[in-house]
Amino acid sequence: MKKTFVDVMLELPVDTTLRDFLTSHCLPVPGGFAWDDTPETSQFLVEAIKVWTDAEARDRMAANLNASVQLGDAAGKQAMFEAVVGDAAALAGLALCSSDLHRSFWLYAHHPALFERACDLDHWAHHGSHAQHYDLGLKRKPIGSDTALAGLRHSISAFYKRELQCGDGCVAYLVALTPGIHLLIVHVKDSAMLRLEFEGVTLTRRIGNPNIPLALEYSEATGVVRALVRGGAKYQQMLIGAFAEHVLGVKAHAQRIKPPTLDLSMLRTGFDVPEVFEDGFSLVQLKALTLLSPGGDLKIECTAMQASQQRSVHELLKEQLPGPLEGNWTVTAAQVNLYYPPEPGRTREKVVTIEVTSKGRLNLGKPDAKMQAQLEGYLVAVGILQKGQTLSAQEMPPETDAVGSTPVIEG
């Protein structure tokens, strides 16, 4: 449930950061007010906000307060520490905060640019599982210069101007997630909209330009990219093409930028990867399969329900509906659940889920680098992915063509 300003105010410590935040928004408090970190002080400040008669100033303060704590959870904490890794002062400040919510508020107040970067990283953590996988095959160290990123922005803006008559503004930057894995973040200015909103107590229509978020993850070692863009294949290919040309220094033809077609046929007999047990999992369940008839006129989606006692869906199909498994039906999607034993004192098992489609969509949840390598390794072991189709595999160093050259790679 979303926290209200009351919840936030009662959870934040009354420290210098909160005092400066509230006074900068001109919250009226008595002269000589003691900014003590006590529950009574927090409650007094809540009541002062409630009776504040300047509706516009109160709303402005509340909007900033709500925005400041959007990273106040475990995922947000991870994003914040990733965003400030190169800033010793910000890193030390975050470490001294008393909670995730406090960390989010502190970073918003003291380092707004790093806060926005953390928000982008948090967005990728939550939505990157929906990215489309591509085997670009270009293994290079990205060029992160201002010139390269300016060219990228110009290319993306030009595309949106042609397609949607928007894109006058574009922001883009590159982040190293782990050695050899890079994340490109892009924000594009959308068309102007009139929104019906309250300004103070007056209902009015306000002009604004929404943000179009784009993101791309790239592996130097394998040349794999994962693109997260609204609009379908044309928009994904645009982003990957612009990234290849301006950030990798290679102009890739459109026919090269195609998602892989993954063979999931081996899942008819289950998900047999002995390595999962060596890594500490206690049970593997093929939870769901989607199958398409030979003529393409019928699709069935089968899921093992709770009553199956964690049996795999292919076993249930063999017993109750063997036709699709025995015939020439195509497996187009699957879900695999991997179970860790319950922690001491608990009865519920921890579940790690893999979702994959034959069109190259791969959802591994939000694993750390080690877990991602393990999960991708399982897919390689079973034959769904090749070694060169993973983000984490370290097969060969990136190519070292001279920066500035732009060879054309034929598809």
Image (cartoon, grey):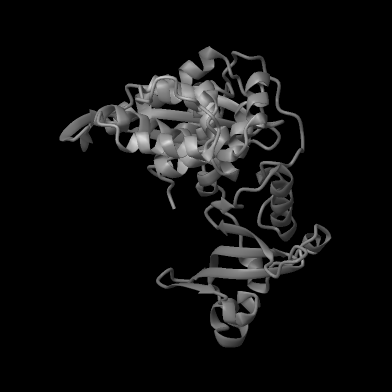
The quadrant holding residue 278 is bottom right
View extreme (right): residue: 278
Quick one: quadrant of the C terminus? top right
Q: 73 and 40: which one is in front?
A: 40
Q: 18 and 51: which one is in front?
A: 51
Q: 142 and 42: which one is in front?
A: 42
Q: Which residue appears at 58% of the width and 77% of the height?
A: 306
Q: Which residue appears at 58% of the width and 43% of the height?
A: 75
Q: Is residue 96 among the parts visible in the rendering? A: yes
For residue 100, side relative to residue 296 (left or right): right
Q: Which residue appears at 42% of the width and 29% of the height?
A: 187
View extreme (bottom): residue: 320
Q: 211 and 138: which one is in front?
A: 211
Report x, y in % for residue 168.
32, 22
Judge whether 294 appears above or below 254 on screen: below
For residue 145, side relative to residue 41 (left or right): right
Judge whether 382 appears above or below 153 on screen: below
Report x, y in % for residue 149.
51, 19
Report x, y in % for residue 298.
42, 73
Total numbered circles: 0
Q: Is residue 131 among the parts visible in the rendering? A: no
Q: Which residue appears at 22% of the width and 32% of the height?
A: 200
Report x, y in % for residue 370.
74, 45
For residue 279, side relative to residue 137 (left or right): right
